[in-house]
Amino acid sequence: MKKQIINDFLDWLNHEHLNLINENAKIIVAVYIRVSTDKQEELSPLSQLKEIYKYTIKHDMQINIDSIFVEEEGISGKNAIKRNEFQNMIAHAKLKEKQFSTILVWKFSRFARNQEESIVYKNMLKKNNVDVVSISEPLIDGPFGSLIERIIEWMDEYYLINLSGEVTRGMTEKAERGEPQSSPAFGYDIKDNKLIPNEKEAPIVQFIYEKYASGELEMINIAKYLNEHHFTTKRGKRWENRTIWYVLTNPVYIGKIRWTPNGKLTREEIYDNTKSIITNGNHQAIISEELYNKARERLNHQRKFSVKRQRISNNPHHWLKGLIRCGECDRTFVRSNHKFRCNGYNKGACSCSATLSIDSIEKLVLKQIQNDSKSLLNINILKNEKTNTSNLSELKILEKQLELSTEKLDRIKIAFQSGIDTMEEYKTNKKNINEEINLLKKEIYEKKHQNNEDNNIENKIIWENMATVYDLLTNEKVDMKKKYDIAHFLIKKIIYDEKNNNLKLYYNEV
């Protein structure tokens, strides 16, 4: 999308015989463009860019073609952390040798609709000598101008909050009329805002209710049967206990509409339905109320046992709990008596039926830790993925700069072919960009080399911890809770491959 908008912008300049280069420019600017996710009337991304260009000509500014940041359509302005182009722009603004001193937006609401975030990011930018300017909401200098800016931000945030309330109110009214609120449940399609039974899926819904309500099959057996016969869910995934349970607790199949204004429900809330609006729908039922109620009676009867099992499962009866994962479906192995088994198989969604003896799996893991503690070779370390997107690492910024510099080559070629640049300008620009690319590649290489040295230090720390962890896990005087904490400190996960009958340990970055 971004590349297409920039190309369309360059084509427009060429067609209108306009020059991207402003000879009178005193300020180099970046451009930030975002389209609202609601249905309010506003300018398209290209139109925003055109208006910003016209503004720069009048105010002696120059757009840096490499500093045009365009969000993908559908990205909300509510949370800046979820806007990739916005975070990319902030990262470039924080560079010592930044390529712009001002960010132009069509409206302040494009920059942020959350006043708190707007203030934080604008202050951050001001510390880096970067201003944010709205071309359609001019401000005067001084304290009064700042006050007006805060009022605009407050109005934008109020609009977002009010819009959310209006949407909730409208959807509630729609639910009370018996109209669907979202994508159709399994068993239905939607046409002209009305649910219509799906000829292929509706019989499966009937099968699920009949087999479960009669007591002939458990949910896991129903899921396995559907998977074995290659029936999939609405999203094309395999069936499991959870998806069968969703079908058995959804009143849509008896001609009802369930709408929850406050969002998703917990399992307990679905059982009692006190936080939902349930009304008669205007669609055809797939099953009878008698069959639905019979299935719910059986669910309620089994409910107390599942609650008890949940309480038991929260206690770490073994330090391997939660660490072993299935190599086929990546689900966790759970304990059953003195064995571990894939939870995906227990739910009917995986074919891995292997049961692992707790004693044997414990010996294998301890042996692997002991072997790994003697050598740094071939150990698997999973890096901590919790990174702050607003503070990109130097390496990521350099790699992004390299990507942008590479794109520059294409853009200056387009500028030359469009008649914006002369041959001499094109050659000079190409030479400068290639020098920039080579310099960035050198810096990236040096940074990666430094990272490899850091990794060796980290490996040594993990290696030193392995020996200690092994001693503690094999010490009978250490209680199970401590062993559990120790094991989870060192080990990220253990993958069991049923086909080859082997284990692979992955260690945490310490």
Image (cartoon, grey):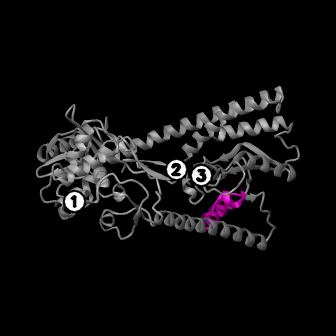
Q: CA gap, disc 1 to disc 2?
A: 32 Å
Report whether residue 5 is seen.
yes
Residue 373 location (% of width, % of height): 25, 42
On screen, residue 125 versus residue 245, left or right, reads: right
Pick whichever of labels 1 and 3 is earlier in the sequence.
3
Q: Which residues are magenta?
A: 107-131
Residue 331 location (% of width, % of height): 28, 46
- Please identify, in this view, whether the residue under mark 1 or under mark 3 is nearer the observer: 1
Q: CA gap, disc 1 to disc 3?
A: 53 Å
Q: Secondary structure at mark 3?
A: helix
Q: Secondary structure at mark 2?
A: loop
**Residue kind at label 1, given as amino acid type:** Lys
Report whether residue 463 is seen.
no
Residue 223 location (% of width, % of height): 25, 45
Q: CA gap, disc 3 to disc 2?
A: 40 Å
228 vs 86, nearest the viewer: 228
Residue at the spot x=56%, y=46% of the render?
394
Residue at the spot x=33%, y=63% of the render?
270
Q: Which residue is mark 3?
A: 87
Query: Label 3 crowding class (10 Å Cα cut-off): few <14, some 14-19, many 20+?
Result: some
Q: Which residue is mark 1?
A: 294
Q: Main secondary structure of the magenta part?
A: helix
**Residue kind at label 2, given as amino acid type:** Asp
